[in-house]
Image (cartoon, rainbow, N blue to C red):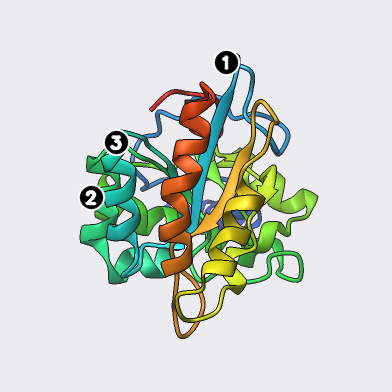
Amino acid sequence: MTSTRPRRLAAALALTLVGATASWAAPAAAAPTSCGKPLPARITATPVTYAKTVSLTFDDGPSAYTPRFLEVLKSYKVHGTFFLKGANVEANPDLARRIVREGHAIGNHTYSHPEMPPLTRTAQAAEMDRATDAIIAATGKRPCLYRSPRGHATPTTQKLALARKMTAVQWTIDTDDWGQPRHPDKAFEKHIYDDATTTRKHPIILMHDGGGAPLYRGNTVHALDDIIRYYQARGYVFTDPLGRRL
């Protein structure tokens, strides 16, 4: 009889090698990707696809405020990009589906919104993969964009995103709306508007439709009307962070 010991040793070695490299590769069971080749460097402005572009991006949702953002965007026939937190997608799958159904772009914003740099490579990979799995389960779409919580990342984070065919996205302008008071405030609403409006030709603007406890994003919702009107009046094309008209 032929011994099975060599084959068992080979199988064990194969599993060890897979375990050592799995955190770099996208999960084998995940939905097929149509993302194409990601941009190699983290982007801070949209590529020049039109003379003037603006990308409105919203982090940390979906949340109870997401429908209000969607209604404002719909009223102007404008689309944005929502960087979704995986745990919130699991809690609000209908809202995630609505974002996609209404033509907006989606991105991976990790599962639980941790600080990424202190985490091991394996833990960072798990945050990305759990978020992607949640997004695929809810929407059937694989995110092709990635944004780190608070924008904090390491070269390892970048490599992990690229291995998953995701372009890492930073921003040109941070409206600081995450720090708004938990009630309507005209002064802070104006602060968001002032921060979000610029003469730069290809800005990516960071806003939030989720995050915080207790959550309040009403000032951003109210500012969004004027922000959209500002860019429409100046002939900007609303795109995703990759400069693609949505």
Location of residue 205 in the rendering, given as x and y in whole percent from the top left corner? 59, 45
The amino acid at mark 1 is Thr
Q: Between marks 1 and 3, how big is the CA–CA gap?
A: 19 Å
Tag 1: Cα neighbours inside 10 Å, few (<14), some, or many (≥20)?
some
Q: Report helix, strand or loop for mark 3.
A: loop
Location of residue 222 in the rendering, given as x and y in whole percent from the top left corner? 42, 59
In this view, 8 is above or below 24: below
Residue shown at 64% from the left, 28% from the top = 202
The disc placed on residue 103 is: 3
Q: Report helix, strand or loop for mark 2.
A: helix
Q: Which residue is mark 1?
A: 49
Q: Which residue is mark 2?
A: 98
90 horizontally vs 35: left or right: left
Q: Between marks 1 and 2, how big is the CA–CA gap?
A: 27 Å
In this view, 170 is above or below 222: above
Q: Are marks 1 and 2 in contact (CB under 8 Å)?
A: no
190 horizontally vs 108: left or right: right
Q: Are marks 1 and 3 in contact (CB under 8 Å)?
A: no
Looking at this view, name the residue that lies furthest to the front: 186
Residue shown at 53% from the left, 36% from the top = 55
215 horizontally vs 152: left or right: left
In this view, 226 is above or below 148: above
Residue shown at 27% from the left, 66% from the top = 92
Residue shown at 45% from the left, 85% from the top = 214
Q: Report helix, strand or loop for mark 1.
A: loop
Looking at this view, name the residue that lies furthest to the bottom: 214
Q: 69 or 234: which is nearer to us?
A: 234
Q: Are marks 2 and 3 in contact (CB under 8 Å)?
A: no
In this view, 114 is above or below 11: below
The amino acid at mark 3 is Gly
